[in-house]
Amino acid sequence: EAEFQMTEEAVAKLIDKKAEDGEKIITVALIGEEVKKKGKRRKLEYSEDDWKGRCEYVLPKKNRRCKMLVKPSKKFCGEHAVFEPTGDSRVRCPLDPRHTVLVSELDAHVEKKCNSRLVENEQLKKNVNAVQGETRYIDKIDYRPTDGEIHYVIDALDMNHDLISSEVEDSIPSTTIHGIASHLSVNESLGSEKRKHLMQINNIVGNFSSFGLLGNDATRCVVDLGAGKAQLTYFTAITASSNRYLVVDRMGARNKWDNRLKKERKDISIHRLRCSIEHLDLKKVQQLEGIESVVGLCKHLCGSGTDAGVRCMLRLMEKEEEGEREGMEKMGERRLEGLVLAPCCAHKARFTEYTGSRFLSCQLGISTMEHFAALRHVATWATCGMDEKEEDGDDERKWSSSWKRRRGRLAKAAIEIGRAKAIEERGFHVRVVRYVEETVSPENLLILAKKL
């Protein structure tokens, strides 16, 4: 964006001015744009008149004033109206401080309008699946590990290379499920990115089936956590149409695949819940009435959302208090049959929420928030595309992009193995597999868990 403002008259004068030695001063645009002189960019000076009618708030990161227009007699724009000293001022929303609201409308906003409000009921209990709180609204991860902490984690990964590598195996299906094959035949012009997503879905469903969890029974429910537009659920339901399906996501989305499924296949039972996984008590969800077995499913559930999803599913195994047991008996017993989880965004995982701490602490010696932050940092090396940016030549040279990418893969694997071990301790047979090639997606690890 432009850094400074200029009037049209100032730009015209600048264009008319002749540069020495025949060099041209090239104006890139009108008000507020940069000027190139002798091949170098420089910032234009501006007068106080250029700022009339503009917001007076100074942006801390850019060290300049905001350029938004303000209403007559106001000093700040709508975005920064919270700093307005008089009148009906604005305050930050207590539910989500990323937006502001008029003081006079605060009560109504919090009670009825704010998209971040949580209306607690029988199936929604605040932070029931979280340790600290819903990861969307708590403080941003901003701890930067030191060089010493990063070196410590790298040494731990190198020393346990064989252990980590032995826990991950390849499981890449060679066949295409019927639903996706049919979809591709009808939509031959699909771009490469959409085809990559379809390949990932195909291989998740393939592993789902081969691991013996998919089933095809009206008494089984597949719960898609962080479903988004529910494309994964769509193709899973086409493959196993007798199952019932529950999709859970905190955001609304247009062109949802579950709506498409309802139109195309009225015989398939599917329901959507709009809520955060951190607050969902599956045992109280009415749509699971009559269900005997439940399977948890997710594709690229971000950061600590995976940990909340694991807790959400494992809560089905917990015994109810005496006062709640009578209502649960009416809904029937439900067995958690297994989990099929494809996590992503390890750099957003939080130490307080992470479910696999025991493995990291006992096997790798990573037991503090600082060392976990370093592990999280190293994990980003697997997905930041360093090999595409530079050619190192020597793959074994320390700190080369190839060397860092391999450590990044080990870090990501360690994080997912920790989660898998925590699930295994609850009586599950667990596998961690690579379900697609890294060229398709570097986020290619899948946790498979089946109740023993």
Image: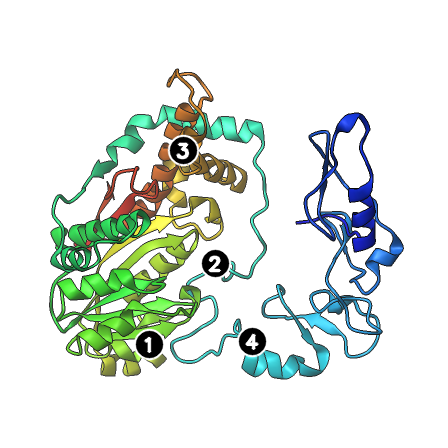
Using the numbered discs, state the Cα–Cα distance from disc 2 to disc 3 in whole angstroms: 27 Å
In the displayed structure image, the side of residue 219 where residue 121 appears, left or right: right
Q: CA distance from mark 2 to mark 1?
A: 20 Å
Which circle's residue, 1 or 3, is located before the other in the chain?
1
Q: Which mark is residue 428?
A: none
Mark drawn on residue 131: 2
- The answer to whether 316 is drawn above or below residue 120 in the figure is above
The mark closer to the camera, 1 or 4, is 4
Left or right position of 6 against 233: right
> Label 1 vs label 4: CA separation?
25 Å
- Name the residue beneath numbered marker 3: 408
Labels 4 and 3 touching (C-beta < 8 A)? no
At a point 28% along the width and 31% down the height, the residue shown is 165
Instruction: Residue under label 1, please give it.
Output: 284
Residue assigned mark 4: 114
Callout 2–callout 3 Cβ contact below 8 Å: no
**Which residue sits at x=51%, y=61%?**
133
Q: Are marks 2 and 1 in contact (CB under 8 Å)?
A: no
- Identify the image quadrant of residue 226: bottom left
